[in-house]
Amino acid sequence: MRREMSQIIKIFDTTLRDGEQSPGASMNMEEKIQIALQLEKLGVDIIEAGFAAASPGDFEAIENVSKIITKSTVCSLARAVSRDIEAAGKAIREAKYKRIHTFIATSPIHMKYKLKMEPGEVIKRAVEAVEFAKTFTDDVEFSCEDAGRSEISFLKEILDAVIEAGATTLNIPDTVGYRLPHEMGALIKELHNFVEDRAILSVHCHNDLGLAVANSIASIENGARQVECTINGLGERAGNAAMEEIVMILKTRRDYFGGLDTHIVTKEIMPTSKLVASITGIHPQPNKAIVGKNAFAHESGIHQDGVLKHQETYEIIKPEDIGLYNAENIVLGKLSGRHAFKEKIESLGFRLSDEELDQSFKRFKLLADKKKEIFDDDLRAIITDEIVKAKEIYKLVNLQINDCMSGMPSAALIIDKEGEEIKDAGIGNGAIDAIFKTIDRISTISGELIEYKVSSVTEGKDALAKVTVKVIFDESKPAVTGHGLNIDTMIASARAYISALNSHLATKDFKNRRDRGGI
Ligand code: KIV
Ligand code: ZN
């Protein structure tokens, strides 16, 4: 089947909302801003920047993303309740292009057990929500949560009502990733025939059975003109449809999908994927399509020989089309100047203030003294470590580990607390335990370590170690994440724990601020 007329498939990116719902992917505001800027550069049509009513942090992040994004539409999610819609409307107020995305569940199981509402009440609530959202912006999207398990007659009824109320985009989520591609295609076909051009039909597919991308593509084939997706397929449970896969399927199989296009600048796919991975600490599996580390690696001799003779023997995508350039991977060295550094940082997707650039440049120079080759991944790690951290109340000044082999490991630390140096030492069940316990004593805040992860940023004996920790400092709150970076794993661990502590304290400060007259 070849379509002649060119049509745009809108890319609705929900990395900052559904993606953030991946366990362990929570991002702070600065991190969200860096990702939003890169999503705009990537060319996404709509950025779902968060769920404004979920927390003051979400609200503020959406508000700030709205102020800086000028090309993409900025969207906030809102349940079909007035409090949520009002928060969404306020959060996106300053966006150049703004959208409210409101939703309510439509499947019998959700209506009966979760909402405890009759179908008629659900329709009424949906209509009220859309009408209220229209008072903030003309661009209103309505989602039938769990549409994949909803009755089609009910879907038509509610869609009819929300179109009448002013919804401009109708989203059909396969919330639990239940549908098979031919079933999803058939559902979209029938709804497309029903809706016609009264609104844009969208899909939002989850990956519980590994079919999110296949279901999104089947939907596009049957009339969906917007797909909701995330970078690297992040998202609730098994994740959402991976944007890079959808986009590259349409591009690579233009022979089949001819006429269907996106606004995505595909050369920005790899930088975006890497940025999201370095910020969230969640890296795509090595064999992940398009952006996995091995997606363009040819291991077998026969394949290597074939690719050397003619690239297309074993490659259907040119690596450079997604922004993968081997030659540029080793980037800077000790003698590189600030200008080259700035350009490189921008090509990796970061936008830094002069002060952040100075700080990062200093960190780069220090690293370049210790490490011969500085790779893109090293720079990403430095920048994420340098700029996206919470305000530093505590800073590591010095660390000494003793007696690891004697069965009595101990750690001596000097920590700066807002200008005052505090010294202490302690023992533990290992060097890391000793470090964390000593930090607890210095701060007088005791943390429960629930996850500790160490990875090397690049390869080689002089590779940077990146440590990620999740710590609960207050039982009534979710765990906070901290990252630490250094060639020495012990120092990276201490930094990670201190960064989690700073995030915990920053959230507390922030809450106090908002409690006085916030949303
Ligand atoms: O999966 C889902 O149904 C959602 C909606 C809120 C769109 O994320
Ligand atoms: Zn979802």
Image (cartoon, rainbow, N blue to C red):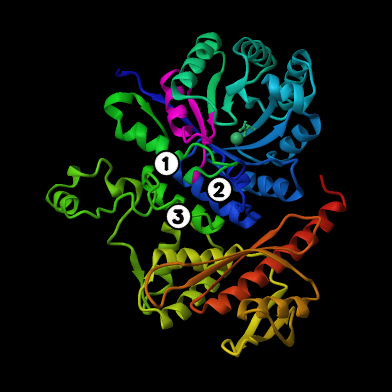
Callout 1 amino acid: Glu
Residue corresponding to mark 1:
244
Q: Is residue 14 above or below residue 204?
A: below
The quarter of the rendered structure image containing the C terminus is top right
Q: Residue at x 56, y 13 (%)?
A: 198
Where's residue 408, x and y in %?
Answer: 65, 87
Q: In the image, what residue occupies the spot 53% across and 31% down?
A: 205
Q: What amino acid type is highlighted by mark number 2?
A: Ala
Image-based side of 57 in relation to 490, left or right: right
Residue at 60%, 30% (x, y): give it: 175
Is 1 situated above or below 382? above
Q: Nearer the viewer, residue 384 or 313?
A: 313
Q: CA distance from mark 1 to mark 3?
A: 12 Å
Circle nearer the N terminus (3, 2): 2
Q: Secondary structure at mark 3?
A: helix
| SS assignment at label 1 | helix
Q: Residues within 10 Å of mark 3 (few under 14, many from 20)?
A: many
How many numbered discs sit on the rendered protein? Answer: 3
Residue carrying label 2: 36
Q: Quadrant of the N terminus?
A: top left
* Mark seen at residue 62: none
Question: Which structural element holds mark 2?
Answer: helix
- Res. 7 visible in picture: yes
Q: Which mark is residue 274?
A: 3
Which residue range is magenta in the image?
A: 204-231
> Foreground mark, 3 or 2?
3
Instruction: Work out whether mark 2 precedes mark 1 in sequence or the reverse, and give the earlier one.
Output: 2
Q: Amino acid at mark 3?
A: Lys
Q: Earlier in the sequence, mark 1 or mark 3?
A: 1
